[in-house]
Image (cartoon, helix red, strand yellow):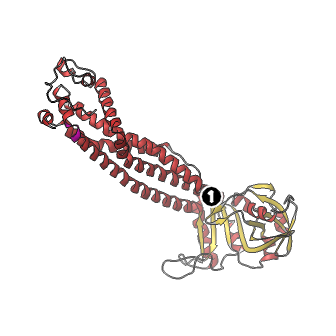
């Protein structure tokens, strides 16, 4: 592409012009013929590719800024999309349309104590909440730490006394066996449903089927009636390391307290959640004889938790994409710098092309196509690198693979736009060179 013709040679005529210039459309104007736009674009594209290939190492290094920027954008979007998907999975695993009521509250104006640090909720509150419109299921929860014993195996975990309706509220699926019944609750039966982690550790040295087996909970015998499917970790807590027993049994055998740890509520539909939350708040304020804003309890809406988490994920995405955008700008400046150097190096070639009939638009388009090719190839390589990096990190962090074509297309369009924006000035500068002055350049 870089041509250094002998200075002793007379300017080429229309009949003696080199074939390479003819291929680029240089003879068209001299002959008075007009080739189609497609021919000129094809000739300019071939010329641009030849120039880039002749300096392929420099071209690759020039495109490196775009590659890194696009890869960072795709990787960041992939990771945050996977994080959002994981949050949705974990929260939906806790149950749909649910409200969690815990004792205590926090206030910004004074010290009321952290939520959960006081005792204010009772089973009577749960019974009253069951009558609130749109409330489908309610269960008080009475929790505590216990020691399990089966054969020669000991395991420390937590036990939760709940109503039979808690299975629906918590969206629990059983791997085997069944949940305890309303009859078990009425009789305060010593039956238990264990989580996946509990089953794995308690029966690690036994080949026995847990269903029907008897284990000791704080030295009291309980029959295992069900094993839950795994849910994983939510909010830093292993949801599978747990034992569920009837609420009445927990009160009678393990924790004889008039207060409960929390109350779980399931609303009949998503649109009714906010209304039910407001009604429950008003009801508990009346029952606890506290003024609005002085509540001794906290009502948590699962949908609000999801919205907060999604907002955090979006903010993190914008931050990472903003940082990656700096790399794209730096890459664009690198392209403009190299293209200006290329114009300087090829000044004599530009003068020859213009002298034999190449149009200024042809010169401009060739350099613009070179810049666009650099950024476009950089965008493609960056997308491949970003998808590979994002997928690898998602697997390493245990995140689901969440792929969307929109950020990929957007990243490519932006990378191409970088080439056009930062390649335009060098291309215009090349097209405005005076052919006489250019031919005098050594």
- State the residue position of label 1: 90
Residue 418 falls left or right of residue 440: right
- Displayed quadrant of residue 121: bottom right
Q: Quadrant of residue 207?
A: bottom right
Magenta stretch bounds: 343-347
Is 429 rendered above or below residue 137?
Answer: above
Q: Decide which of 276, 362 is in the foreground and name it.
A: 362
Left or right, 409 with respect to 300, comes to left
Q: In the image, is 306 to the left or to the right of 211?
A: left
Query: Foreground: 173 or 26?
Result: 26
User: Looking at the picture, how far across and down is residue 191, in whole percent?
Assistant: 84, 66
Residue 440: percent from left, percent from top: 12, 35
Numbered label tally: 1
**In what quadrant of the picture does the N terminus appear?**
top left
Query: Is residue 364 shown in magenta?
Result: no
Q: Residue, x 15% and y 36% (percent of image)?
A: 438
């Amino acid at each position: 592409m870089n041509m250094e013709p002998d200075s002793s040679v007379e300017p080429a005529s229309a009949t003696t012009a080199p074939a390479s210039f003819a291929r680029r459309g240089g003879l068209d104007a001299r002959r008075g013929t007009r080739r189609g736009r497609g021919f000129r674009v094809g000739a300019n594209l071939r010329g641009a590719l030849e120039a880039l290939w002749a300096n392929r190492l420099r071209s690759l290094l020039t495109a490196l800024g775009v590659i890194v920027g696009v890869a960072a954008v795709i990787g960041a979007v992939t990771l945050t999309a996977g994080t959002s998907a994981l949050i949705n999975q974990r929260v939906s695993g806790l149950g749909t349309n649910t409200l969690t009521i815990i004792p205590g509250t926090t206030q910004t104006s004074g010290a009321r104590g952290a939520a959960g640090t006081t005792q204010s909720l009772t089973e009577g509150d749960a019974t009253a909440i069951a009558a609130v419109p749109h409330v489908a299921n309610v269960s008080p929860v009475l929790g505590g730490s216990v020691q399990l014993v089966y054969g020669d195996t000991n395991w420390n975990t937590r036990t939760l006394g709940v109503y039979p309706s808690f299975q629906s509220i918590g969206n629990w699926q059983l791997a085997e066996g069944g949940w305890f019944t309303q009859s078990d609750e009425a009789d305060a039966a010593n039956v238990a449903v264990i989580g996946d982690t509990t089953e794995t550790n308690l029966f690690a040295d036994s080949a026995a089927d847990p269903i029907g087996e008897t284990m000791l909970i704080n030295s009291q015998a309980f029959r295992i009636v069900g094993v839950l499917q795994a849910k994983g970790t939510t909010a830093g807590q292993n949801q599978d390391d747990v034992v569920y027993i009837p609420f009445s049994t927990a009160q009678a055998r393990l924790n004889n307290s008039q207060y409960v740890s929390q109350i779980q509520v399931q609303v009949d539909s998503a649109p009714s959640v906010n209304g039910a939350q407001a009604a429950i708040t008003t009801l508990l304020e009346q029952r606890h004889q506290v003024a609005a804003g002085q509540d001794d309890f906290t009502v948590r809406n699962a949908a609000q938790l999801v919205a907060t988490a999604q907002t955090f994920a979006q903010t993190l995405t914008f931050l990472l994409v903003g940082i990656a955008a700096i790399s794209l700008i730096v890459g664009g400046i690198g392209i403009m710098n190299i293209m200006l150097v290329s114009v300087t190096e090829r000044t004599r070639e530009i003068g020859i092309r213009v002298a034999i009939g190449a149009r200024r638009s042809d010169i401009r388009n060739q350099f613009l196509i070179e810049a666009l090719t650099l950024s476009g190839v950089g965008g493609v390589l960056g997308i491949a690198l970003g998808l590979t990096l994002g997928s690898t990190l998602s697997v390493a962090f245990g995140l689901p693979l969440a792929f969307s074509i929109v950020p990929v297309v957007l990243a490519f369009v932006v990378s191409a736009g970088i080439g056009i924006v930062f390649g335009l000035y060098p291309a215009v500068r090349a097209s405005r060179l005076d052919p006489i002055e250019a031919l005098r350049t050594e």
